[in-house]
Image (cartoon, helix red, strand yellow):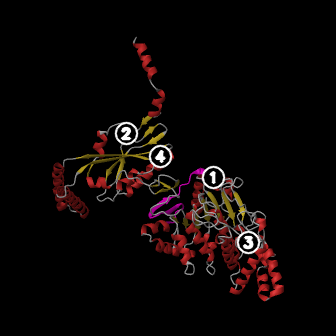
Amino acid sequence: MFGKQRIQEQKLQNKALLNVVAPMGIGFAKNSLDLGENRGKVFGLIHYPQKVEVEWLSKITNIPATVVAIGWRPVDNANLINAISRSVVWQRGIADGAKDPLSRQRAEKAADDGENIIMQIDREGETVGLMSVAIMPIAKDEKMFKRACRCAESIVSVMKCKMRVISNLQKEGFRHISPSFPMEQKIEGILQRIVPMSTFVGGFPFAGSGFNDGNGIYFAQDTSGGLVIVDTWKRGGDRTNSNFVIMGNSGVGKSTAIKHIILSEFMRGTKIFVIDPESEYRELCQNLGGQWVNAVGGSRGMINPLQVRPSPKDDEQETECGRLYPDEQCSVEENPERKLSQLAMHMKNLEIFFSLYIPSITDMQRAVLKKCLVELYQRFHITWTTDISGMSPEDFPVFSDLYQLLKEKAAEEGQVYKELALLLYDLAEGADGFIWNGRSSVSQAGAGSEENGAIMVLDTNALQGTGDHIKRTQYFNLLTWCWEQISRDRKERVMLVCDEAYLMIDQNVPQSLVYLRNMMKRARKYEGVLAIVSHSMVDFLSDSVRQYGQALLDIPCYKVLMGTDGRNLKETTELYDLTEAEQEILLARKRGHALFMVGAKRLHIHFVIPDYKMKYMGGAGGR
């Protein structure tokens, strides 16, 4: 009868539940324990510093790969004061009778500390109690376990605390830390120390580390190992845009950081455009199924500067004819101003284009050139009121058409046309024609189309061997095309990354920098992000371009400042009003470490990138 009952009880046991709530096995040694597949060791704090900082306990509770238990028990103040008084008298006696200076100094210090505690308890009504702190590093393999133990010992030592292994009591130590058991009296008896209530409460033992927007992407880790979770599209408070600036010397991890951000935004469905001067993003683009474009022209990389690009509407309710209310009917004849902006605004961009390409162009030559451009567009049936939204790349002129028009004018009207024809010969029939003379062949759909994927890399590496005026002119041409992609749809998230952005700066012709600044100011209206990546702060803050370059460094709400020194560090310190501790972070130049500014908040972060992301990045930079 009893045998049948025992069998029934065994059948009622839920073994699956037992396997979930209980580890596979527990073993205890003298100075360690095995918890399933994990190795652990229980330590206890046995000494605390005389003075502690605010939130001092949070540094202990946030040690990576550790479990911490903190106990607190109030004690009777009267009995404590009597005990401390006896201790003070005893220490004074030791100090008076000490023969060596070290013993006398230590006894006097102990007596002074005791008197301060008595005053704090008796006069100010401070509550005191017995506090115990137990720490258990835990890891799956021996290497990681030893690293977790060293990390815990290092952090505790830096705080001027002392801890030791609880030998022969690892089982009791585990029960003490485990939430399944009450506090072990043996462990409390070993670890309890008298501590004022203000010291305990001021330690904020449960203060969280890291930074968390509650939504967004994993960005990095802070110095305590806490996660930094950032929602780059968050608006409100001190965050008004989603722009980035990433600065730092070569080799400190800028490429890794920006590729990490690109991958995170790619996974969120953001369209990505990258201007890549060093061919570092080709493998990343191919691994993500995107489109890589040689942006130095050719059959697949041509962006025709003479192709009119639509100007975006600044008001969400603005209709194509300029009316604020879509129910109202209007025509081009009634309101030509809206259609005027498409060609007229593009003419302003062409003026900057020619100023960058021909820095020595005179005012007279510029005026004649603009007149010829208007005539050229009229030959292609494009006027101030023409709607270009439905036109294809074949409907627009190219530079060989402009060159032929100038030669015709030169034969009839005079010297200025001959000069312009000579200045533009390279664009039409010379070497520069391979970059700009042709119909646009880069997909107008850009990134995000079915054929291209959600990322497009515009590789400008071949430009690095050309003259400065060629580089800056093409960068401006690419920027105007990218702005068209950003402003195409207000509700679509688009990110433009300008790597080595200093290449876009021309101190003699700052219009390109002005255009970049205006893009950054307006991007937030179109769900756009502009990320500036460079290694030199000085390039943006020289006297000739400071009024434009400084805005590119000030406007972004997200600033990642990595290792730097010398004049760059000085300029960074003055611009962002860095403290000495923040300067030391940059001066250390540790790879992957950065000062991260999120609005008004500043964090010391470490980019710890998952292995799966590193595989996507490829081997060209960012390793």
Q: Secondary structure at mark 3?
A: loop
Q: CA distance from mark 1 to mark 3?
A: 40 Å
N-terminal-most mark, 2 or 3: 2
Is 474 left, or right, of 572 in this rendering? right
Q: Can you identify the residue that label 2 sits on?
A: 179
Q: Position of residue 530 (x, y in %)?
A: 58, 65
Mark 1 / mark 2, whichever is N-terminal: 2
- Residue 542 x/y as whole percent: 55, 79
Task: Report the mark closest to the observer, 2 or 4.
Answer: 2
Of tags 3 and 4, which is closer to the observer? 3
- What residue lies at 31% left-to-right and 57% top-to-bottom? 49
Q: Are marks 1 and 3 in contact (CB under 8 Å)?
A: no
Q: Is residue 329 at all visible to an observer of this figure?
A: yes
Q: Which span is picked out in magenta?
A: 588-615
Which dot marks residue 490? none
Quadrant including the N terminus: top left
Q: Secondary structure beneath disc 2?
A: loop
Q: Label 1 neighbourhood size at 10 Å, few (<14), some (14-19), many (20+)?
A: few
Distance between the alpha carbons at the discs numbered 2 and 3? 72 Å
Q: CA distance from mark 1 to mark 2?
A: 40 Å
Q: Specify the amino acid type for callout 2.
A: Pro
Q: Earlier in the sequence, mark 3 or mark 4?
A: 4
Q: Is residue 183 above or below residue 160?
A: above
Question: Callout 2: few (<14), some (14-19), or many (20+) C-alpha neighbours within 10 Å?
Answer: few
Q: Earlier in the sequence, mark 2 or mark 4?
A: 4
Q: Which residue is mark 4?
A: 145
CA separation in Å, label 4 and label 1:
27 Å
Q: Quadrant of the C terminus?
A: bottom right
Check disc 3 and report the residue beneath it: 306
Amino acid beneath label 1:
Lys
